[in-house]
Image (cartoon, helix red, strand yellow):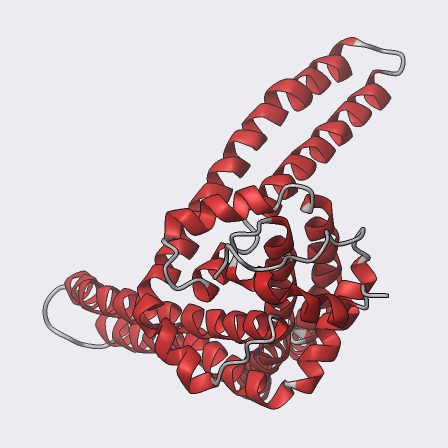
Amino acid sequence: MLENAQYPPPLPPLNVGNVVSAAIRLYRSHLKSYFGIAFVASLWSFLPLIALLLLIVLGSAVFARAFLGNTDGSPWGILILAMLILIPIWLTLAIFCWGKSLMNTALISRLAALELANQPESVAEARRQLKSKTWIFLWLQFVVSCLLGTASFFLSAITSIVFNYPATIIAGTLENGGDILAVLLTGLGYLTYYAAYFWIYAHLFIPEVLLAVELNTTMSAAIERCWKFSHGFVWHIVAIATIVLLVSVPVYLFSVFPMLLVIFSFAATFPDGPGPEVIGRFVIAFFLTIALFFGINIFLIPLGRRLKAFFTSIFATAGKDLILALVIPHFRNELGLLG
């Protein structure tokens, strides 16, 4: 069937504004279904945090009883035993929850990509298709994180050797203009690092979307195809990722505003120390911050997945072996690229 398909001509130069506005428009048109999936994904991702908070409270109680109470035996033995039991339980729960969360975010990617491909799929059917890949998504996320971490390590080492170390020598040896030259050289090093890092990041932007859309694709094949198809779109991806970052970071920072107010309250009580009222406000502000972060996460997850789905469709035009290339005209209409 793919061999007989008629592919559209190549896409004209992409406008970042068109991609973002189209993603927002399509997100609004399916807000209810995506909101529900994002709620489930966020809930799974927050469960390990909630469990960790409970463990901290429990650990504090054990600590208080062991070190401040009149118990028999070694208090350190009690604490170490509790850690040996509780930490593996928490890690198991965290891995399970992260896998479920990643599967649900991939579910949004699949629904969005197939909708752009004019092949809409029900939530139940898409979930059934991806259920068996839950742990593959988790492993893929781990591998991509390791690749990006390794790239960051080597890029940091290279920029330190090529730029930062010579800048230090120049600043210490040249009296006239040495500091300015050192600052310029250090700035060039940072610029080189971030340019190279984002270039690599753009090549690993959507392997989970390819894995979700093409059910027969393996994890390694998804990474390889993502790297291949992103050629020619790297700086479009970087530009859109930067826009999303500039929008999302201030919004997420807003969620910590209640905590900042309480921290200032703590500072106002120094050196007398916070009273019970301030501590009570701290607890309330902490849970309010978690709730705000949770709510913001629910709204932003589908938007990010929409943008990734758009690039999956763009890659489908560039790499004609993708199944989405059969129906790219619908996608081109959504971006307003057809005359």
**Above or below 241: residue 277:** below
Residue 309 located left or right of residue 253: left
Label count reads 0
Between 288 and 32, the one lying in front of the other is 32
Instruction: Give the percent coordinates (x, y) of residue 142.
Output: 40, 53
In the image as oriented, which residue stretches furthest toward the right?
176
Q: Please report the residue visible at 68 percent of the width from the left and 45 percent of the height from the top.
A: 234
Q: Residue at x 73, y 55 (%)?
A: 242
Query: Vertical placement of 104 versus 307: above or below?
Result: below
Indicate left or right for 67 with 169 as reference. Answer: left
Query: What residue is drawn where x is 59% and y is 68%?
Result: 305
Against 161, residue 262 (above or below) is below
Figure quadrant of residue 272 = bottom right
**Residue 338 percent across, percent down from the top left:** 81, 65
Quarter where residue 133 is shown: bottom left
Q: Is residue 72 visible?
A: yes
Does residue 275 appear in the picture of this structure? no
Q: Nearer the viewer, residue 281 or 268?
A: 281
- Does 335 sit above or below residue 147? below
Residue found at x 57% / y 31% = 155
- Could you tell me residue 298's position as x and y percent? 58, 80
Q: Residue 138, image x and y in percent?
A: 37, 61
Left-right relation of 314 to 228: right
Query: For residue 85, which quarter of the picture?
Result: bottom left
Q: Nearer the viewer, residue 49 or 213?
A: 213
Q: Residue furthest front?
A: 4
Task: State the quadrant of the C terminus.
Answer: bottom right
